[in-house]
Image: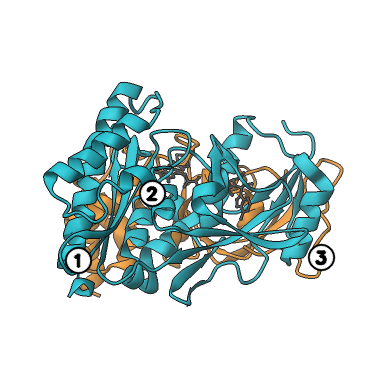
Amino acid sequence: MTAADPSAPSTSPRPVDGEGKISLTLHVNGREEHLRARPHHTLLEVLRNELHLTGAREGCGVGMCGACTVLLDGRPISGCLLPAALAEGHELTTIEGLEGPNGELHPIQEAYVEHTGFQCSYCTPGFILTTKALLEERPDVSRDEAKAYLAGNLCRCGSYVKILDSVMDARDRLRGG
Amino acid sequence: MPGSLAFYHPTTLEDAIGLLGEHGDEAKVVAGATALTILMRQRLVAPSALVSLGSIPGLDRIEEVDGSLRIGAMVRHRDVELSQIVRARIPVLAETFGKVANVRVRNAATVGGVLAESDYASDPPAVFVALDAEVEVRGPNGERTIPARDFFVAFYETALEPDEIVTGIVVPVPAAGSGTSYHKFVTRSSEDRPCVGVAALVRLAPDGSAADLRVAVGAAAETPQRFPDYEALGRGHVLSDDIVGRVADAYAGAIDTLDDMRGSAWYRTEMVRVWVRRAIESARDAAASGPAAH
Ligand SMILES: Cc1cc2nc3c(=O)[nH]c(=O)nc-3n(C[C@H](O)[C@H](O)[C@H](O)COP(=O)(O)OP(=O)(O)OC[C@H]3O[C@@H](n4cnc5c(N)ncnc54)[C@H](O)[C@@H]3O)c2cc1C
Ligand code: FES
Ligand code: FES
C-alpha cells in the first residue's frame, strides 16, 4: 500500500498537525477525498466520522462479522482492521458507491430487496459488497460456493436462507446482462 | 488514547530496518495490520512508531527458484490461496492459506505477518514446518535464513531480532512421489482458528513403503511440534493402520498440550491422536494416487 506523498523522504514520519492528526487522501466511490485523522484511526472510523459514509458499520470490531466490509481494489476487507493510512492509493468502494448515476439500485441490491434478504439490515451492506466481489470473481458461482465464500459475514437476525436466495438471483440478473 | 503515533512509509528495506533500529522497542512493523490493529485497540501493544512495509517494492512476489517456491513477506493470504503456481507446485499451501479466517482477513493478512506474529493458533506455521521451509530475514547486518522449525520460539515469540524484518519464505517443492495434507480441526465455527491443525508429508518408495514421513502439529502447544524420532517409526515401513497408529500415539504422548477455549489439554491430546492419523493417511493416499508416484 503506497504512501500519500511519494516525494516524502522514506525515513520521515507523516507530518502531524497541532491536533495530532495526519492528512489523508482516499479514493472512495470514484471520488478523491482529503481529510485529517489521527494516525491510528481505522478506515471504518474515518469513513463514518470524517466522510459520513455510514453504510459500513461496526459489529464485532475484530474482523469476524463483516458489518464493516469495504471493497479495496474490488476485494472485501474489514474496515475495522485497516488503519486508514494504509488505505491510501487504493480504490475503495462502500455500499454508497453502488447506486447508478440517477440513484438507481444496483442489480445486487434489487435482488436483496426482492427476496427480503435482511431483517434489521445491519449486516446488509457487508453482505451486498461481499456478494459483488464474489460475483465478479465467479459469475457462475453455485449456492454451496456462495455459502462458503459468505461464511465470514454474520447475520444476527439469521436471514441466511433469504440472503442466499438473493445472491443466486443477483447472479442470474448479472449473467442475464 | 495513544499519545502520539508516528507513521512511516519507508520505500526501501534498508530505511525500514534503520527506522526499527532508531526506535527500538517503541516501533512496530505493520504489514496487513489484521493482528496489530486489534492488539493496539485492546491496548496490548502501544507503539509510538508504525513502520509500514507497503511502500517497499518487490516484497509481494511468488516465484519458483531452484525447486522451491519463494513467497514474499507482503504476499496476501488470499494470493497464496489463488496463486496458479502454488496450486500447481505445492497445493497443500494454497489449501491451508484458503482455510484461514474469512475472505476479508485473507485479503489483508500477509505471509510475513503470520510468521512474525507466531500465534500458536495459526494454520500456516505447521505446514511450513512440515515442508522444511526457510524464513528469509533481513537486518542491519544483512540477510540470513532461519529454518521454520527454529523460527517459532514461544507464544508470540520468534527468532527475529527487534530490528530484523521477514522478507519472505522459501518452501521446497515436495519431491516426486510425495503426497501432502493439512487437516484443520475447529471446535466452534467453520471460520475459527484451529483447535488442532496437522500437516503431513509422505513420499512413497516404488515398493510402497514410506521413503519420507513428516508430521507437524499446530495449535496444540506454544509452537508447531515435530518429532523426527517418531516420524522415523513410519519411515521405511508400509504405512499400515498399525504403523500410522503408533506414530499418532507417539505424537499424542509427546506433546504437552495446552488448554484454551477451543479445547482442554486432555481433549487436545486425543484430537492430536485422531488428526495425526488422518493427516498421515491423507498424505499417504495422495502420494499413492498422485501422478508423481508413477
Ligand atoms: C477474525 C480473525 C480470524 C483469524 N483466523 C485465523 C485462522 O483461522 N488461522 C490463522 O492462521 N490465522 C487466523 N487469523 C490471524 C491472521 O491470519 C493474522 O492476523 C495475520 O496472519 C497477521 O498478518 P498481517 O499481515 O495482518 O500482520 P500485522 O497485523 O501487520 O502484523 C502482525 C505482527 O507481525 C509483525 N510483522 C508483520 N510483518 C512483518 C515482517 N515482514 N517482518 C517482521 N515483523 C512483521 C508486526 O509487527 C506485528 O507484530 C485470524 C485473524 C482474524 C482477525
Ligand atoms: S466490525 Fe469489522 S468485521 Fe466485525
Ligand atoms: S438482517 Fe439483522 S443482522 Fe442481518
Image position of B252 (left or right of A18):
left
Chain of the residue under label 1? A
**Which chain does the orange colour mark?**
A
Q: Which residue is mark 1?
A: A172
Amino acid type assigned to the residue bearing label 2 in the image: Val
Q: Which residue is mark 2?
A: B100
The Cα atoms of the two marked residues, 1 and 2, are separated by 30 Å
In the image, residue A73 lies at what x, y percent?
Answer: 50, 65
Chain of the residue under label 2? B
**Which chain does the cyan colour mark?**
B
In the image, residue B6 lies at what x, y percent?
Answer: 78, 47
Amino acid type assigned to the residue bearing label 3 in the image: Ala
Q: Within 8 Å of ligand 1, the CB of disc 2?
A: yes
- Asked if residue A47 shows in the view, the reply is no
- Residue at 44%, 61% in the rendered image: A75
Q: Which residue is mark 3?
A: A8
Q: Are marks 2 and 3 in contact (CB under 8 Å)?
A: no
Image position of A51 (left or right of B248):
right
Tell which of B31 and B128 is nearer to you.
Answer: B128
User: Is B226 above or below relative to B85?
Assistant: above
Q: Quadrant of the N terminus of chain B?
A: top right
Tell which of B257 and B18 is nearer to you.
Answer: B257
Amino acid type assigned to the residue bearing label 1 in the image: Asp
Q: Neighbour class for label 3 at 10 Å: few (<14), some, many (≥20)? A: some
